[in-house]
């Protein structure tokens, strides 16, 4: 499992994020507080909202390619 924190500034960021993560075969989820969401679902990503951090959990240890694709959304 790999984990990174992500945040979106605009709705366009959310759509771009989804286009990128959909390319990968990994199972992904977003944890936002006590809520666990499907990271490949527009409705779930919109639920998180703008300027809210969420923890992206990816079902593989080797997701460097994914992290490079979404690096603009990764926060500390």
Image (cartoon, rainbow, N blue to C red):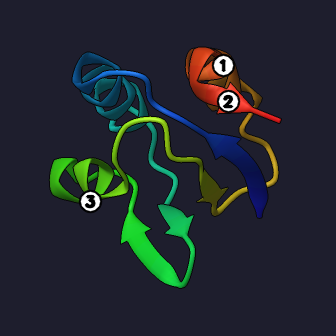
- Which residue in the protein does label 2 denote? 74
Is 51 placed above or below 36 here?
above
- Residue at 19 percent of width and 47 percent of height: 42
Q: Which mark is residue 46?
A: none
Q: Which of 66 and 72 lies nearest the eye of the viewer?
A: 72
Q: Which mark is residue 71?
A: 1
SS at circle 3? helix
Query: Do callouts 3 and 2 mark residues in contact (Cβ within 8 Å)?
Result: no
The alpha-carbon separation of the residues under discs 1 and 3 comes to: 20 Å
Residue 8 in picture, x, y percent from top left = 45, 30
SS at circle 1? helix
Residue 25 in picture, x, y percent from top left = 45, 48
Residue 49 in picture, x, y percent from top left = 34, 46
Residue 31 in picture, x, y percent from top left = 55, 68
Q: Where, by quadrant of the figure, is residue 24 drawn?
A: top left
Query: Do callouts 1 and 2 mark residues in contact (Cβ within 8 Å)?
Result: yes
The alpha-carbon separation of the residues under discs 3 and 2 comes to: 18 Å
- Which residue in the protein does label 3 denote? 44
The alpha-carbon separation of the residues under discs 1 and 2 comes to: 5 Å
Is 33 placed above or below 51 here?
below
- Residue at 52 percent of width and 53 percent of height: 26
- Residue at 67 percent of width and 29 percent of height: 74
Specify which label sits upstream in the sequence, 3 or 2.
Answer: 3
SS at circle 2? strand
Q: Does residue 33 appear left or right of residue 76 in this picture?
A: left
Q: Does residue 71 appear left or right of residue 44 in this picture?
A: right
- Residue at 77 percent of width and 64 percent of height: 1
Specify the farthest residue to the left.
43
Q: Does residue 33 appear left or right of residue 16 in this picture?
A: right
Query: Do callouts 1 and 3 mark residues in contact (Cβ within 8 Å)?
Result: no
Specify which label sits upstream in the sequence, 1 or 3.
Answer: 3
């Amino acid at each position: 499992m790999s984990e990174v924190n992500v945040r979106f500034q605009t709705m366009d960021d959310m759509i771009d994020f989804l286009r990128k993560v959909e390319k990968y075969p990994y199972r992904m989820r977003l944890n936002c507080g006590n809520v666990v969401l499907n990271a490949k679902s527009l409705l779930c990503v919109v639920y998180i909202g703008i300027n809210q951090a969420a923890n992206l959990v990816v079902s593989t240890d080797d997701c460097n390619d994914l992290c490079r694709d979404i690096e603009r959304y990764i926060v500390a």
